[in-house]
Image (cartoon, helix red, strand yellow):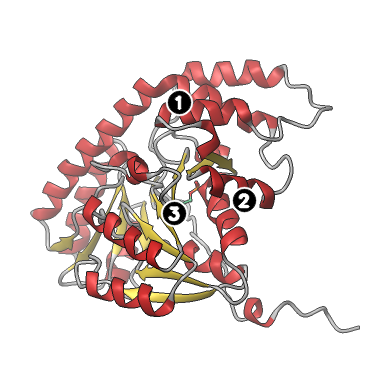
Amino acid sequence: MARPQVRDDIAMMSGYHSPQLDVSIRLNTNEAPEPPPDEFRERVAAAVHDVAWHRYPSRDAAGLRARIAEVEGVDPSQVFAANGSNEVLQTVMLAYGGAGRTALTFEPTYALHGHISRLVGTRVVEGERDDDFALDPAEVERLITTERPSVTFLCSPNNPTGVIESEATVRTVLDLVHAVDGLLVVDEAYGQFAPWSALELVDDTNSLVVTRTYSKTWSMAAARLGYGVAPTWVVDELDKVVLPYHLDAAKQIAGTIALDYLDEMRARVSALVEERGRVAAALDELDVDHWPSGANFILFRPRSRSGAEVWRALVDRSILVRNCASWPRLDDCLRLTLGTREENDEFVSALRSALEAS
Ligand code: PMP
């Protein structure tokens, strides 16, 4: 008996991995360094205790959507919640991508935009950025006009570069996308760390989806919860496509209760933004280049040693950062997720000694 064959395009793919090593300081997956408040944990535990486990959960997660809508200042009909913002992206592509359609990314960016697009059979066109990872308006216009993508992805702040797209850029791209009857997705997984948000552009006349996550700001990567804010007519299509009861009861509870701790979470964001400035200033003093970040991580490149060597030297000092050194367009780059003040201090001194060792 021959094994069943997967689709040819999937046989060619490699999966998406973020290796974990046994180190004492893990600064490689852009998680929050601190857990949510204790009171949150206690309230979630008590509420989960009362779940009617024999029943399906709320199918439309109306309570959760309403709270997200309140926090983001939009209408509940403009909110689509899912298992991580990855599932929001996947649902968007199931609905708006597919065979015979094109998705446009600007590389380097979050690998899952292209990966999910391909998984659902969408052709992916990869646009380029300039050497500082900024968008080139002429290239953007050329690609949108000639390729007429069904879905165009931006990521602001961009992962893994940290670079923010300006409001003017997003407005320009939105106009171009409208001219080809496409949809613009702005991935704001790190949006709360940035000075402005494309959320303010979401309304029923703009073909714009902004995706956000509980995994970073809300210190809730374990919960797997994210959401998209989009025109009602987009949310209606996403609701048709996603599996019934995809959000389990415990997740809906955790996501709703979390939003009672806005002040605590904003304080965590401010602390990380402050750490970002402090670490960036420390990097200025070292033999590395780094890019201005609007996120909870910083991309840097050692000037005199290879990225792979420095990554290994950091691991030897029990610090794990993301090794992007062999990724296309990111030669020798490493990405540091900001941790606690103490972790960041340890990182800076380990990096200093790693750069000095030869
Ligand atoms: N978008 C970007 C840019 C990300 O970096 C991540 C997390 N790595 C995600 C989306 C997915 O986040 P989640 O599924 O945890 O919400």
Mark 2 Cα within 10 Å, few/some/many (few <14, many 20+)?
some
Judge whether residue 191 can be spotted in this image. Answer: yes
Q: Is residue 105 left or right of residue 342?
A: right
Q: Report if residue 328 is visible in the image.
A: no
Query: Residue at 24% across / 38% down in the picture?
Result: 273
Q: Which mark is residue 237?
A: 2
Viewer-nearest of labels 1 and 3?
3
Q: Position of residue 133 (x, y in %)?
A: 24, 66
| Residue 207 image label | 3
Going by the numbered disc 3, the residue's amino acid type is Ser
Residue 121 point in image, percent of width and height? 61, 73
Is residue 153 rendered to the left or right of residue 195?
right
Estimate the spatial distance between the alpha carbons at disc 3 and disc 2, rounded to whole Å.
Answer: 13 Å
Q: Depth check: 189 or 274 in front?
A: 189
Height in image: 323 above or below 211? Answer: below
User: Which sits in the foreground, 19 or 256?
Assistant: 256
Relative to residue 82, is residue 110 depicted above or below? Answer: below
Nearest the viewer among 331 and 126 is: 126
Residues under numbered marks 3 and 2 in contact, where contact means CB atoms less than 8 Å apart: no
The amino acid marked with disc number 2 is Glu
Cα separation, mark 1 vs mark 3, equals 21 Å
| Residue corresponding to mark 1 | 70
Splitting the image into 4 quarters, where does residue 94 fall? bottom right
Pointer 1 or 3: first along the chain: 1
